[in-house]
Amino acid sequence: MYLYYVDTSNCSSLPNFKNGIDVSDPIHGHVIQISHLILEAVKEMPKNWLRYGERRVEDIVGVFVNLLAMHTDDSRFNLPKDILFPFHILSVLDPKAKWCTQWLHAAFGQHLFLNTLSQNMALVTFLVEEILSYLETYQNGHPGDMPENIIPGCIVKYATFTHTLSVLSQVVCFEKGRQFFPVVTKTTSELVSLEVMLVRMIMFLNSGSSYKSTVCMTPSGFEVILAFVKKLLQIGEEINENLMKTIIEPIKYRSMQPMKCNNIPCHTMKILLHLASSSTKISCLLGSRQKHKLSISKLNRNQNTTNTSAVGMRKTRQMNISLERQFSARSVRIPSIGNTDVSSPAKLIEHITTILMKHQDLSNVDELLSLVEMCGKLFRIHEGLSMLDAMNSQLISAVIVLYKQLSSEIESSRYCSAHEYPLKIKAGNPPHAVYMSLVSFLTEVASTPCGLYALAQEDSVLQDLLTTLFQYSYVPWEHPAFRHVVSLITAVWQGASVLAEESYRILTRPLCNLWSEFEDPLALMSGSERKQIEATQHFINVIYTFIPNLQGIMALLSEPDSSSEGTLVDTDMAPRTLAELLTFDSTVEPWHYISLLTLRALTTNMDVCLYLNSTIKYQEKLLKLQSENMSESEIEESRMKSNSVNKCIIIDKCSLLRHQILIATYAVGGPSERILPAVVIDAEHLDGDGESNLFCSLPPPKLASATRKMRSTRLKGQTDIQRFLQDTKQGLHDASWLSHARRAYRASCSDDIKGSVLLDLLEQVAKLSSNSQYQLSAPLQESKYGVLSPEECLGVQVVIRYGVELHLLQESPQNEENLTQLLCLLKHRKCETFQGLDWFAATVFLLCGGNMERCQSCIGNISALPVTPFLWPAHASAKDNLQSLSQHSAMFGHILELLIKMELPLAFSALQVTCLFIQGNPKIF
């Protein structure tokens, strides 16, 4: 190959851009054959890296890179610039640079190629110049009829551009490859960085989108440029204002004109959708971070930073934390309504989507689907939904209108001919795809408290949406995001009504799956329990979706009219509903153990625990099962004595799980207040006489308490907040006092704060709101609804036991009477069904030590606070409509999730998996 280019006498016979490559020409054909052989050898090289020595492999890689950069050495090859060099020939044979993909697949190849490339920067400069030159000199149009056996020069240029772009896109994926930039080129006086190349490519795509009757370039070339742009956006550390302005320029220009789906550039939609799909780039579309972002990675690469001591590392870590907090705090700010510049590209996206939805323009379904998907990703997060609220956007309303129309036509098309409906809704056609996209968008919006509140104000939207989700042939219960959305929707009455109708269908499928797995003959013969465990976990996932919502569990326990249409025959022993599963009438395995697992999951919600104990009397049933699981015979090796009498409870996995449920529901508390018995027995869980402390009657003979063990042993003294309250008790209580009180409270958070200090704090804070418009009427008035439900009576007993166990209350029969009286006085409405215990009032009762006068004073002080609806969910729900989602609860849940998401992302993910948001009421124990 070198000989053809070293000998200047062959320059006239070599292929060139003007005449192209003539395959029938002997010299051209020979050059192509040699290039093809080199290319095949290069592709085989990564398979034999380890066969040869490292030095030899480095020489081979160096020779190949020099071959690619042959035309950059003007002093060695004095040939016309129109000549096609090996790089151009290889580009025609491999335009997608598959050889580079194979070389950079493993770490060894990456090290060799990037090191060699760093020693030959002329090749990198050529790659950059070739791309920029092609973008500047490109002319639309391709040759019509190509002569046989001839590859025109324009095709060679296009193949060279594609090959160059493919090589560079793979090189910049690595940190060492990005260090080659910025590059000094011959065509421009300024340095060319990756950002400059990115802007040039997007401008090239934008210029092509202005032509309506022509195509910018072949689809493959469009995809290559778009793939390179996406890759640069993905690896980029930040997106500045100039780059974002270039990206949204086409849609910003078209937003000022009559909008149609056909006028939206597809490349702009794909780039914006790529940014919206990235968790690190979506904030740039919201216009809240790119101006203020300070890259920590840039600080770490500062050459002046040489302090590697422990003190220096601590300072650096503290700096990083402060930067992250500053970063997240600024990201909360929502742009104003009048701000329409590029600091908020999401506004343009929302504006265009709203117009298309209102006009119901389905002329270009692909672009409309991209817009809807993009809006779903932008406005499912809390910052985006807050932006919609600040803009008074009509997007959700427009989506709901189109969704209702498509939904009604889908329902009606089942009974009428399709020509009666203009959109012709059928599975697989564009309108049906739009309908499914709208379902996905509304599902994303409903994943946040404020979005759920907005949808709850629309008639029957949540009911239709939840029904559609349950009617899928495959319901993804294993996905945490799906369970989170379903849990939120079923927290309101619209979702609970659908759940009552669909409860049989929801549970029948996982129960049938459980039955089939446990009765599978192949599993019985092989002894494998993997599928059985997976089926059990799938069923428990379904149950955990509804545990945070008392109304959801009550709906699952109901028996709708459709329950008679079962898929199981009458001879089957498997339960068909949740109510049948929790009867405990049969101890047939595996259903008894599965019912115990289900009960253990359900009783983690205190309101559900009270409701189940009142309706199905599960404690009595478990105690009866424990008493029936006794043996009077001599103890064998597999059985252990559980009490001092002659009878003993047989220890197995069911009896241990029943024992844990009884302890957990009788003595509530956290890990520092009680020790739950294990469901797997070992020597550590036996007492000194080898007994396991199982029991068959309440109260338990012995409770394992961790209160004394976990209590702090530090010397008692006054905390900062206590001293501050004593010093300022008689002074002026204004905004300055509140600021100092907050600082004192934060300084005392690491110490135990006494209940009396909290009461004093509430009393003094209430002075700030004595004349506030948020002042609530005194709740402790004679109520006409002063009768507790059976569930609330059980809750009173639980609270009293908890207070006595932790020495918050003295043992006295007056405690139960006082708490009952307090709850009766605080009742604001009469409910036909149990709505949950007022746990906040019960907490105040414990905080005051059962003193009714102190309780009345404390509740009066709390009622004067503006934040009372957030602290006291029961009181807030009494002020709102009972048949709708509380606005206070939605606001509080949205702000709480937003703060936790930014400051504690891992905790936010964990809470979403367990579906513990929206209500703002800590009922899980």
Image (spheres, rainbow, N blue to C red):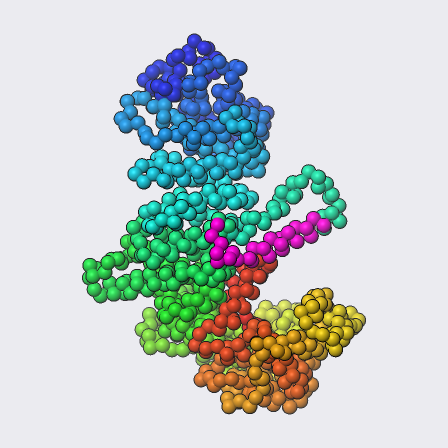
Viewport quadrant of the C terminus: bottom right
Image coords of residue 709 (percent x, y): 72, 72
Residue at 46%, 72% in the rendered image: 885
Residue 297 relative to residue 424: left or right: right
Residue 623 in view, yes or no? no
Q: Residue reaching furthest top?
A: 9
Image quadrant where residue 856 sits: bottom right
Image coords of residue 247 (percent x, y): 45, 44
Image coords of residue 852 (percent x, y): 65, 87
Residue at 36%, 35% in the rendered image: 217
Viewport quadrant of the N terminus: top left
Q: Main secondary structure of the magenta part?
A: helix
Say which of 573 and 840 sits in front: 840
Image quadrant where residue 892 sits: bottom right
| Segment colored magenta | 315-341
Magenta stretch: residue 406 in it?
no
Residue at 52%, 87% in the rendered image: 788
Q: In this view, does 629 lie above or below 900?
A: below
Residue at 44%, 70% in the rendered image: 490
Say which of 350 and 557 sits in front: 350
Image quadrant where residue 204 sits: top left
Residue 281 relative to residue 569: left or right: right
